[in-house]
Image (cartoon, grey):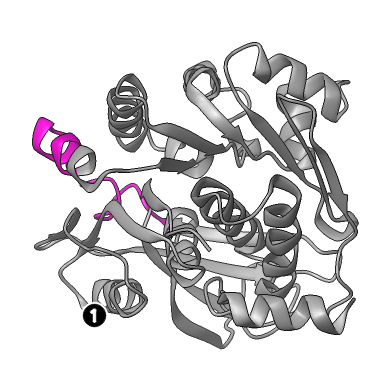
Amino acid sequence: MSEGARVGCVGDLLVEFVCASRNGRHKRAETYSGPYPSGAAGIFIDQAAQVGGRCIFVGAVGDDAFGEVVLRRLVDHGVTPQLIRVVPSVPTGTAFVSYNDDGSRDFVYNIVLSAAARFDDDDATIAALDAFGLDVMHVSGSALSDEGMCAKVLRICKALHAKGVTISFDPNVRKELIGNPAYFAAVGEMIDMTGIFLPSEDDAATLFPGRDLDGVAAAVFAKGARCVVLKKGDKGCEGLTRDGQRAGFAAHDVQVLDPTGAGDCFCATFVTLYAAGAYSFGEAMRRANAAGALAVTKVGPMEGNSNLPAIEALLKRNA
């Protein structure tokens, strides 16, 4: 197997609390479990490290106990913390999630007033990323929902893209921002730089209405992307490369305890294995599909993250 890919990520770090009962929508006194380390970008980089990536992260946490929870998890799994700021006198971001019987989720966030967007995007940060020797830099669309964070993410990605670093992008479209032209302009800027495009079915329907995988692929290949992988939840996944490789896999039958983070886990596994050249396009997708299934089997957005032996074990059981 080839050496692990050098994977970077920039975006949100926070802790999450999960409501123990359903259908409360945070509107009554309930018991919550947590704090669980979280943030779409944080989940991604933790999983990338667990499947063999050499990982660096650009983000920020507060100088508080919640920040320690997040940092400890990432460092313990091998993520380089050099570019994670610890911001004095500002709280770490938080999210509270409550699940409903119809499969929907209700979130209450403290991101805007937290440390999450207070990372550096200066020349020194970009130089440090360049020196790390990145094979790929990943962004989740959740990082574009905050105006301040969005500007920093775009600056970093544009600088790295100009240096020839592959950009991986999960649009993770925020439905509450659909009417915000600036948000969709930022999503468009990211797509223009993207080499590895990783939308969900809902993302694809929002960004490329009426198009199937081939139609979405044609649109992003014209902008320079080399592959598209469509995440389809309980229907599995399908993907296509610029040179015509096609793969698709059915979802694994697992008990779903907490779906938050499954898409980030999928993306991290695919990007890390594919960028390293350790697996073919289809083989990387197959393992990403298994990682996404494992992610939903534990409560907490990062608790279901898995390493390669666990992924291979699931594939063997379900062969």
* Residue at figure coordinates x 26%, y 71% from the top left: 67
Q: Could you tell me what secondary structure mostly forms the magenta stretch?
A: loop
Quadrant the C terminus occupies:
bottom right
> In terms of image quadrants, where is residue 87?
bottom left
* Residue at figure coordinates x 81%, y 64% from the top left: 103
Residue 22 locus on image (x, y percent):
74, 78
Residue 217 locus on image (x, y percent):
75, 23
Does the stretch in magenta take in 123?
A: yes
* Residue at figure coordinates x 52%, y 27% from the top left: 194
Does the stretch in magenta take in 200?
A: no
Residue 211 lies, with reference to residue 315, above or below; the image says above
Instruction: State the residue in front, 155 or 24.
Output: 155
Name of the residue lying farthest toward the front = 1
Residue 217 lies, with reference to residue 171, above or below; the image says above
Instruction: State the residue in front, 52 or 280.
Output: 280
Left or right of 7 on screen, residue 272: right
Instruction: State the residue in front, 108 or 35.
Output: 35
Residue 244 locus on image (x, y percent):
79, 27
Residue, disc 1: 65
Left or right of 115 on screen, residue 269: right
Name of the residue lying farthest toward the top = 222
Q: What amino acid is found at the position of numbered circle 1 in the picture?
A: Ala
Residue 197 lies, with reference to residue 247, above or below; the image says above
* Residue at figure coordinates x 70%, y 24% from the top left: 242
Residue 11 in sight here? no
Residue 286 locus on image (x, y percent):
76, 59
Instruction: State the residue in front, 20 or 213.
Output: 213
> Magenta segment, which residues?
110-128
